[in-house]
Structures are given as C-alpha cells and as structure tokens.
Amino acid sequence: MPNDFNQRIIDEFRANNGRVGGPFEGGRLLLTTTGARTGAPHTTPVGYLPDGGDQVLVIASAGGAPKHPDWFHNLVANPLVTVEDGVFTYQARATVLEGADRDRAFARAAEADPGWAAYQARTTRTIPVVALRPVSGGPPNAASPGAGLKLLHDAFRRELSLIRREIAESGPGIGAQLRVNCLTVCQGLRNHHTGEDTTMFPFLTEHHPELAPVLERLRAEHERIATLVAELHKVVSSTAADPALVRAEVDRLADELERHLAHEEEQLIPVLDA
C-alpha cells in the first residue's frame, strides 16, 4: 500500500486528470508495479521524460538515497507495468537502460533539470533510467467521447505550456531534452490529427452530414497546423537551434492550435455526447 503522502498525490492525480500541486507539482505519471515478493500491485507517483514517440523514461532516483526504490526492484522482477498519464491508462513493458544508452538519457535529464545530477552526487549507486514502452492501449479515461476529446486536447495544451516555460528558462541554446519534448509533441499532433481525419471525421460525415462544412474547415486547419509542426520540427532539429526562434515557432503553433481546438470542441463535443 502507498504511504499516506503518496496516496494523497495519487488521489489528487486521478481526480485532476494528471495534475498535482505542492511538493510533487510536475509529477506526471502513476506507475503500478507488481510486488517482487508479494505479487500485489503497488502504485507510485513518478516524474517522466518524453523519449520520442510513445516511449517515456522514468528515473529511479529515490531522492539520491543509497538504495534503489521499491518500484524499481518490482519492475526488474516483473517488467510488465501499468501507466497512468492523466489521459490514458495502459500496460507498458519496462526496460532498464544500460551503458551508453543510460548515460546519454541521464545526461539529457540532468541538463534539463540539475536536480537529477544532485541526486546522483548524493549516492554511490548508479541511478537507473527505465524506458516504458506501451504494449496495450485504449480510449481516454473519460465518461464520454466528448469528454475524452477535451481531455486529449487539454494534454496538448499542457505540454505546449510546459515547453514554453522550458524555453523561457533555457540558456543560450536548446537542450537535448527540450528538443525531444518539442519533437514528441509534434509527433503526437500528427498522430492525433491523422486519427481524426481517417476515423472520427468519416464517421461523423456518414452519420451527421450537416457537419460537412465544419469538418471541411477542421481538415483545412489540420493542414495549416501540419505546416507549423513541420516548421517547428525543422527549427528544433537544427544543431544550433536559436531559443528565440524556437519560442516564436512554438507560439505560432500554440496560438493556431488553440483556435482550432476551441472551435472543434464547440462544434463536435455536443454531437459526440448526444
């Protein structure tokens, strides 16, 4: 069972679609492992780092304690875990990174947040980095299709807001983790809009022909957003990316995306939930 402190965070996370405040603000994931000795499920709030695509990284820092956290021992014994990210709950397979792969990932994390380096400096153990790759998925954790759409949209809003803050706090260059964060959002938007264009919009066209003008506008907006995503991808991928230029591209994308998301929610959520 989680301790009282962790349980309060878990309850707040689940009640607020992945958002928590206080000392664990920024904790972005609930990880449920199977007890190595007991076989019982154990849920722990952890931070994570995007790693491109669907894969995310978690770091078994335990605040720099001399021993690895219990959740790490559990996933080594049973690598199949459950992940909650505030939008989706899914099973993932955990892989402990080794050698150069671990060192590169940890260096990227420490560049983005020096706290990770401080934890490593407190202990003689090598702090593990674990990759979590989904093996199963499902719809958003929402009571209705419309609520699921809003939940997914809010996740994109949140990620872009975090990226804006990270750029504002960055130095003269763009760090490796910030670059990965931007590229991950770009890929997520492409996947989301492709799914809408190929699945949701054809369904709505068939069952609600009166929405044709709305869907035509939304498809056109997808094309404009795809152009902005490509521009951001190009700027961020440069080895000498200028933070001011990246910020300008992120702002352009975020502003255009917000107009699109607000219009889509206004027009489609009532229909999806009818």
Image (cartoon, rainbow, N blue to C red):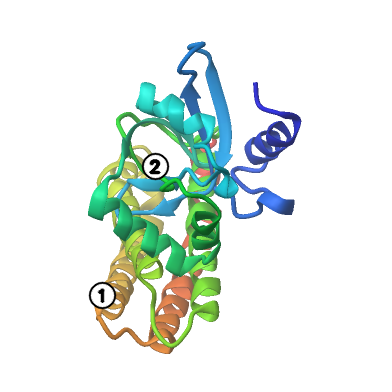
Of all residues, the one furthest to the front in this rendering is 124
Spatial CA span between label 1 and label 2: 41 Å
Q: Residues within 10 Å of mark 2 (few under 14, many from 20)?
A: few
Q: How crowded is mark 1: few (under 14 residues within 10 Å), some or many (20 or more)?
A: some
User: Regarding mark 2 in the picture, which secondary structure is present there?
Assistant: loop
Q: Taking 14 as reference, is 173 above or below it?
A: below
Q: What is the x, y in percent for residue 168?
A: 54, 80
Which residue is rendered at x = 45% and y = 64% of the image?
110
Nearest the viewer among 18 and 116 is: 116
Which label was assigned to residue 113? none
Which residue is rendered at x = 31% and y = 56% of the image?
103
**Quarter of the view holding residue 177:** bottom left
Question: Does residue 30 appear left or right of residue 97 in this picture?
Answer: right
Residue corresponding to mark 2: 208
User: Regarding mark 1 in the picture, which secondary structure is present there?
Assistant: helix
Q: Is residue 217 something one can see in this rendering?
A: yes
**Quarter of the view holding residue 17:** top right
Q: Taking 86 as reference, is 162 above or below it?
A: below
Amino acid type, callout 2: His
Q: Is residue 197 something one can see in this rendering?
A: no
Which label was assigned to residue 237? 1
Q: What is the x, y in percent for residue 14?
A: 63, 36
Quarter containing the N terminus: top right
Nearest the viewer among 101 and 1 is: 101
**Quarter of the view holding residue 108:** bottom left
